[in-house]
Amino acid sequence: MWCCSSSFLSPSILLRPPHSIPKTLTLTLCPPRRSKPLAVSSSSSSIAISDPFVLEIAEKLEDSLASSSSSSSVQSFPPLQTLRESSSQSLLYTPWPTRKSDPFRFTDISYLRKYPILPTPTPTLPSSPLDSPFPNLLTLVNGVVVPSLSSLSALPTGVFVGSIADIPQGALYDRVVAALDYSNGIVEKDIFWDFNSVGAADIAVIHVPAGVRVVDEPIHVQFGYSGGGVGAEESVMPMSNPRVLVVVEEGAEAMIVEEHFGVEGSEEKCYWANSVMELVIEEGAKVSHSYIQRQSLKAAHIKWTIARQKSTSSYKLVEVSTGGKLSRHNLHIQQLGPDTVTDLSAFHFAQNKQIQDLHSKLILDHPRGYSRQLHKCIVCDPEGHAIFDGNIRVNRFAQKTDAGQQTRTLLLGPQALVHVKPNLQIVADDVKCAHGATVSDIQEDQLFYFRTRGLDLETAKNALVFSFGNEVINHIPFEPIKKKVISQVKELLSSQKLSAVG
C-alpha cells in the first residue's frame, strides 16, 4: 500500500498499480501548475479571443430557450435574466478547457466534442411514473420540472417544492431573488457553470421555512435524461442544464435525495447532463444530502454543487457515482460563521474506460469550524481513470478549526490510473488538521484471511472490494436508497473480472 500524508500543501501524485511499475516504487511528484488568470472584463476585450466552439454552444442554448414555450414564464424571471446575461458575457471571453489549464490538467473532456451538441427539445415524458420509495418526489426531465410525474403529498406546512415559475409575489419570491442575486457574485465558477446559467430552461426550488423539519420523509429529487442516437450509431449529444436552488432557513432541517439517470431507453444512450445545485443553509439549520449518479455509460455528467453555511449549521453530503463515460463533480462549500459542521463522503466506481472526477473546495473563515472529508474510488478497467483534487483552506480567523481529509483508491486493472491531490492550505495557527492519500490493490494477506475461512478466491475478492466502497454507502441515511445502491454496486462487481491479485 502506498501512502501520502501531510498537514501542509501537498504536490500532485500520479499513481499506477504495481503491475505497470518495477518493484522499486516510483512516484512522479509535480508542483502545482499556475493557471494564467482569464480576463473577462470589458476593458480586456481587445486582447481576449472568443472561442468559436464555446460561442456555438451558447448560441444554440439561447436559441433553444427562445423557441421553447414551456420555459417562457421562467425566462421572464428578472434574477434569472441577470444571471443569464452575466454568464453570456463571461462566455464571450472563456476558452474551451484543455489539459493546459490547471483545473483540467488531469481530466480529459474531449468526449464532449465527439458528437455535435444540441440542446434537448421539450422533454419527452416517460410512459410510466418514475419509481420512488418516498411520498415527496420532485421530477425533472431534461432540466424541466414535470408536475405530472411529481408527488409532494407529505410536505410540512409552509414548505415549497416546485418550479420557480410557480412562486407567487411575496416573501418567498423576494427570498429566491436574493439567493439568485448572490449567485452572480460567485468568483470561482467555470465554463460549465456559465453554460448552465445560459441554458437552464427551468429552476427547481426547495424552500424550508425557519424551524420546520423535513426529516421523516425526505425530498426525493429525480433527474431523468433522454439520449440521442441508437446503440453505436450516435449522431448528436443532447445537452440539458437542470438547476436546483435549496434554501433552508434558520433552525430548519431538510433531508434531500438527489438521483440522476437515463429514462425511456436512454440508459445506454449518449447525452450530456450539465447540472447545478445551490444550497443556502442558514444559522443553526441542518441538511442531509444524498447524491446518486447512475447515468448511461455513454453519457457525460458535469455537476456543480455549491453550499453556503451560516454559523452553527450542519451539512452532510454522501455521494455515490457509478455512471457516465465522463463524470465530473465540482463541489464548493464555504463556512460563513463559527461552529459550523461539514461532513463529506464520496464513493466513485470507474469501469469501461470511465473517468470519475471529484474537484472539491472547502473554505473555513470562522472559529471552531469542523470538517471531515472521505473520498474512496475503485478503478476496475485497465483504461479507467479516477481524479481527486480536494482543497481545504483554513484562513486566518478560523482558529480552533478541526479539519480532516482522506482519499483512498483501489486499483484493480494493470493500467488503471489515478491522480490524487489532497491539500490543506492553513493560515490560522491554532488548528487541528490532517490529510492523507492511499492507493493499493487487493492485499494478499487480506485474501489469505478469507481463504483460510473457506471462501473461494472470487468470493473473497468481491467481498473485499465491496466492503471498500460500503464504508461510504453505509453513510446513506435512507434504507430504500441504500439497498438500491448496494444492489447496483454488487451487480457492477459481478460483471467485472477482478484480476489485481491471484
Image: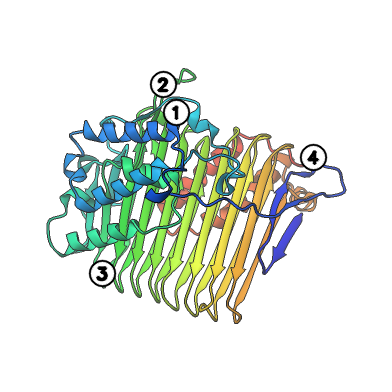
Amino acid type, callout 3:
Val
Location of mark 2 (residue): 229
Marks 1 and 2, Cα distance to the nearest angstrom?
Answer: 7 Å
Marks 1 and 4, Cα distance to the nearest angstrom?
Answer: 33 Å
Q: Point out the tag, 1 or 2, that comes first from the N-terminus.
A: 2
Location of mark 4 (residue): 19
Marks 2 and 3, Cα distance to the nearest angstrom?
Answer: 46 Å
Q: Residue at x 72, y 60 (%)?
A: 4
Q: Point out the tag, 3 or 4, that comes first from the N-terminus.
A: 4
Question: Looking at the rendered structure, which numbered label has been put on residue 321?
Answer: none
Location of mark 1 (residue): 270
| Place of residue 86 in the rendered image (x, y in percent of width and height, measured from the top left) | 32, 49
Q: Point out the tag, 4 or 2, that comes first from the N-terminus.
A: 4
Marks 3 and 4, Cα distance to the nearest angstrom?
Answer: 55 Å
Front residue (pair 365, 484): 365
Q: Residue at x 39, y 76 (%)?
A: 311
Location of mark 3 (residue): 212
Cβ atoms under marks 3 and 4 closer than 8 Å: no
| 144 to 304, vertically: above or below | above
Amino acid type, callout 2:
Gly
Query: Mark 1 against mark 4, which lies toward the viewer?
Result: 1
Front residue (pair 60, 500): 60
Amino acid type, callout 4:
His
| 67 to 481, vertically: above or below | above
In the image, 439: left or right of 207? right
